[in-house]
Image (cartoon, rainbow, N blue to C red):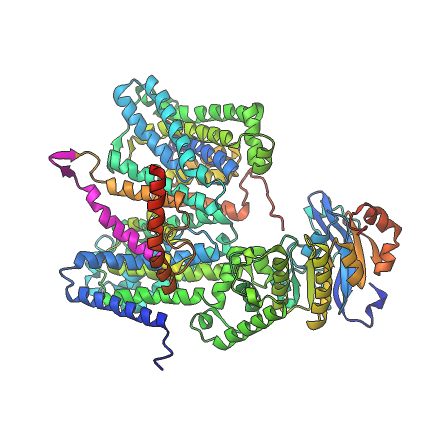
Amino acid sequence: MSLSTFFQQCLTGISLGGAYALIAIGYTLVYGILRLINFAHGDIFMMAGYFMIFAMASFPWFISIPLVLFITVVLGVSIERIAYRPLRSAPRMSVMISAIGVSYLLQNLATYLFTALPKGYPELPVLKKIYQIGGLSASFVTFLTPVLTLIIVYALMVLINKTKIGMAMRAVSKDYDTASLMGIKINRIITFTFAIGSLLAAVGSVLYFTDRMTVFPFSGSLPGLKCFVAAVFGGIGSIPGAVIGGFILGLGETALVATGYSTFSDAFTFVLLIAILLIKPTGLFGEKTTDKV
Amino acid sequence: MSAEAKTPINVLHMEDVTMQFGGVVAVNGLSLDVNEGEIVALIGPNGAGKTTAFNCVTGIYEPTFGKVDFMGETILSNTPKGKAEKTYLGEVTPRPIPVIRNTPDKITQKGVARTFQNIRLFGQLTVFDNVLIAKHMRAKQNVLSATLRFNHKEEERMRSEAMALLEEQNLLHLKDEIAASLPYGLQRRLEIARALATEPKLLLLDEPAAGMNPQETQELTDFIKQIRDTYHLTVFMIEHHMDLVMQISDRIYVLDFGKLIAQGTPEEIQNNERVIEAYLGVSDDAED
Amino acid sequence: MKKKAISKNKLYSLIALLFVIGILGMLQANSAQYSYQISILERSAIYAVVAVSMNLLTGFTGLFSLGQAGFMAIGAYTVAILTIPADTRASVYYVDGIAPAIANLQCPFWLALILAGLFSAAIAAIIGIPVLRLKSDYLAIATLGFSEIIRAVISAPQLNKITNGSYGLKNIPAFPNLFVAFGLCGLCILLMVLLINSSYGRAFKALREDEVAAQAMGLNLFRYKELAFVISSFFTGVGGGLLAIYMRSIDSKTFSINLTYDILLIVVLGGIGSVTGSVIGAFLVTAGREWLRFFDNPLTIGGIDIPLFRSGFRMVIFSILLMAVVLFYRRGIMGSNEFSWEGLGRLIRSIPNKLKRKSKTQKGDNA
C-alpha cells in the first residue's frame, strides 16, 4: 500500500469515525442518565436519513437541514415520552425490551412507509465538492466531519460542565434518586438528554449518509450497535470516551475493509467490545462503581 | 493468639484482618477468635466495620491484609502487593504471607453460613424452595441425573430434610407462601432456617434483631440459644440490641472505626470505659 | 398402573395429548392439502423450543442474553453440513468446491441434531468464560456481539469450502413426517421443563433472585451461570438445526439479530419465566404474522381503496401490538405462571364475572 493510499484510508476512517462519534454520544448520554441502552437510537438516526430525503424534495438544503434536525429531536423526545417514561420504575430488563420494541417498530414503520428498497440520499453540492490536498482527494464532507465533530463535542462539554442544566445532568447521572430529592426535575433533564442525543444523531446522519448515498430501513441498526460499542469502549457516560471510541471504530473498520477483510469489519466492532469488557469493563474513561452487600 | 484456645476447639480465627477501600480502612488489623459452642457478639457503632468484617469471613470481600482460619484451616489470606502495598494505610504492618482465596460458595460449603443485614431471601420463590435451595450443594447429583430424575432418592432426602427443618422452625404452615410476602419477623426467621439448611458449623448472624420489638427480641434470644444447642453450632453475630447481646453472648468484641477497642465477657464490656465512651454512652439501646 | 391412581388432571392432559396427536395425524394424512398450515405449525414448534431455551436463561436464571441467533446458526450449519446428501454436495458447493474433510461426512438427522446441540454448547462454554462475568445490559450486548461474530465467521469467504460463505446451504433433507418434527420439539421442551423443575432449576432461580444470597447457599455463580448458558445454547443449537431441516436451505442472513429479537418477542409476549407462556407465545406470534397478512393486501370496501392497507402494514400492526404488551401488559400472557388445568378452570369460571363487571362499568360510564 502506498503512502498516499494509506493517508487516504486514514481520512476515510476518521471521517466515518466522526459520524460514529456523534451517534455514540447519544448512547453515552442516555445510558449515563437512565442506565438504558437506547436500542432505538440507531433507528432514530435512520429515520433522520429518510426525513432528509423528503425535506430535500421540497426545500433547499439550508432549510432542510434545520428542519430535519428539528423533526428528529421531536421523534427522539416522543419515543422517550411514550416508550420509556411509563417504565421508569420497571425492572431494567423491561425498559430494554421496550427499547428493542421501539427499534423494531421504527424499522417496520420505515419498511411500510418507504419500502425496503434503498432510497437515494440527496446530494448536497456543498458537501460533495471534491477537494484536493497534496496527494489526497476527498469530498468536503470527509474533511468536515471530524472538524464538525470536534466542535460539537467541545460545545457539548461546555454545556455539561459550565451550565446549570449541564450540572443537573451530571447530578442525575451520578445519583438519580438523590438528584430528584434535590429538586431537579428529572423528566425535564431526561427529555433534554434525548433531545441532544437525537440532534447529534441527525447531524451524524447527514454526514454519514452523504458518504453512503442510500438509506434503507435497516441502515440504522448495525451502525447503531457499533456506536453503542464505541460508547462502551470509551467508557459509558464519558463524552470524550465516546468520541475516541467512535474514531477508533471508524479507523479499525476502514483498515479491515482496506486490507480485504470486509466481512469481518462488523465483527471487528464486537471483538473490540468483548476485548474492552474483559480488560477494562468500565471502558477507557469510565468510572468504577461498586455494589454494596 | 488467645491463651484459652488450648482446650476448646477453635472455630474461627481472624488475624490482623484489614480491609481497605480506596483511602478508607473499614476494618483495621482485626484479630479475634470464636470457639466451638460459643455465642460471640461483634458490636460497635454504625459504620464501625462490623458487616465488612463478616464479608471478609464469608469471602465476599478479599481482605487487603490478614488471614482467616476456619476449623484450623486457612480459608482466606492476603497481603498487599504492588500498588496496593504503596497505598496501604492499615495499622498492622503487612508481612509476606501466602495468598489464599476462596469464593463465598466454597466457604459456605466448608460450613460457614450467614444471614444478611438487609434480608436477602429468594423473594419470588416459596418458603419451601428457599430452604430446599440451601440443600442443593450437598446433594449427590449432577445435571443429567437431576433432569432425568435419577436422583429421586436424593431429592426425596432433600425435601424431607427441608420439611423437617421448616417444622422445627415453626414455618411449615407457610411452606407454599412466597418468601417476599412474609412479615418481616418471619422473613428473618426464614433466613436463619435457610442458613441452617446449609448444615453449618459456624453461623454468622448480621443484626438478627434489627427492626424487632422487645418481645420479638426476647423470643429471638431464646431462639438463638436453642438453635445453638439443637444444631451444635457456634454463633458469631453482629447486634445492636444491647440486652440481647448481654444476655446471650459468652464473649463480646467491640469495634470502633474498624479497630478492636475491647473484648471480654458481657460484664467486662459493660464496665469498660472505652466502650462506654465510644459506644454505650451515645447509644439509645444501652438504656432499655 | 391402577386406574384410580390416574388423577383428573393427568386424564385431562392425556386427552389433550391424544387430541393433539389426532390433529397431527389428520394433518399428516392430508399433508398436501394443509401444507401451509403444517408449515406454520412446524415453524411455531421450532420457535417454541428456542423461546423456551431463551426463557431458561432470561426468565429462570436471570441472564439476559441476546445470542440466540448465533447459536441457532451454529446448530443449523452443523445439521446442514452433516445431512446434505453426499451426491448433491457438488451442486451445493458450486462456488469453491467442498473441503475434502467434510465431503463424505454424513449422518442421520437425529445424530446431526445432537451434534448440532453439542457443538453449539461447546462454543457457548468458551464464550461463556469471558462473557458471563458481565451484568445485565453488558451481558446482552456482548452476547449479541458474539452472535454477530459467529454470523460473520460463517459468511466469511475464507470458509467457503465449509459453510459456502454468503451463498448458503441447500438440499437439506426435510423431516420424514410431522410427528418427527413435533416429537423432537416436544422432547426438547420436556427436557427443559424437567431441568427447570429439578434441583438445578431451583439453583438457577436462586441465582436470578439474588446472586449474593445464592453464593451464601454454596452455589458457585460462575459454574451455575455457565451451566445454564451451555444448556440453553445446546437447545438453541438443536432449535437451529430443526430450523435448518424445516427450511431446507439456509444462509447466514437468516440468523441476523432480528431472529433473536423475534424470539425475544415471543418470550416477552408469553411471559418471562413461563415455559407454557413461551410455547403459547411462539404459536401466537408465528400464526399471528400469518393472520395479519390481510393487512398487507390492498383492501377495497365499496369500491374505495382503504389507503393504509399495503405491503408492510402487518408488521407495523404487529410491532404496535408488541409495544402495547410491553407498555401496558408487562407480564405477558402467562406472567411467570405455568399452565394448569385448575388455572384454566378458574379462568373459564371468571369470564362471566369479568364480563358482568365490564358491562357494569360501562353502564356506569354512560350514566
Residue at the left extreme of this rendering: C303
**Residue sitting at x 36%, y 48%:** C357
C129 drawn magenta: no
The residue range painted magenta reads C278-305
Front residue of this view, candidates A71 and C66 = A71
Front residue of this view, candidates B264 and A267 = B264
User: Horizontal placement of C223 versus C48: left or right?
Assistant: right
Residue A61 spot, x, y in % from top left: 32, 19
Prevalent SS, magenta region: helix
Residue A254 visible within the image: no
Residue A51 spot, x, y in % from top left: 31, 27
**Residue sitting at x 34%, y 17%:** A62
Q: Is residue B190 above or below residue C332?
A: below
Residue C58 visible within the image: yes
**Residue sitting at x 36%, y 64%:** C341
Q: Is residue C298 above or below residue C48?
A: above
Q: Quadrant of residue C218?
A: bottom right
Residue at the front extreme of this rendering: C367
Q: In this figure, what is the number of numbered marks? A: 0
Q: Quadrant of residue C276?
A: bottom left
Residue A57 spot, x, y in % from top left: 25, 22
Quarter that holds the N terminus of chain B: bottom right
Front residue of this view, candidates C89 and C97 = C89
Residue C96 spot, x, y in % from top left: 25, 53
Q: Is residue A125 above or below residue C218?
A: above
User: Horizontal placement of C205 versus A110: left or right?
Assistant: right
Residue at the bottom extreme of this rendering: C2
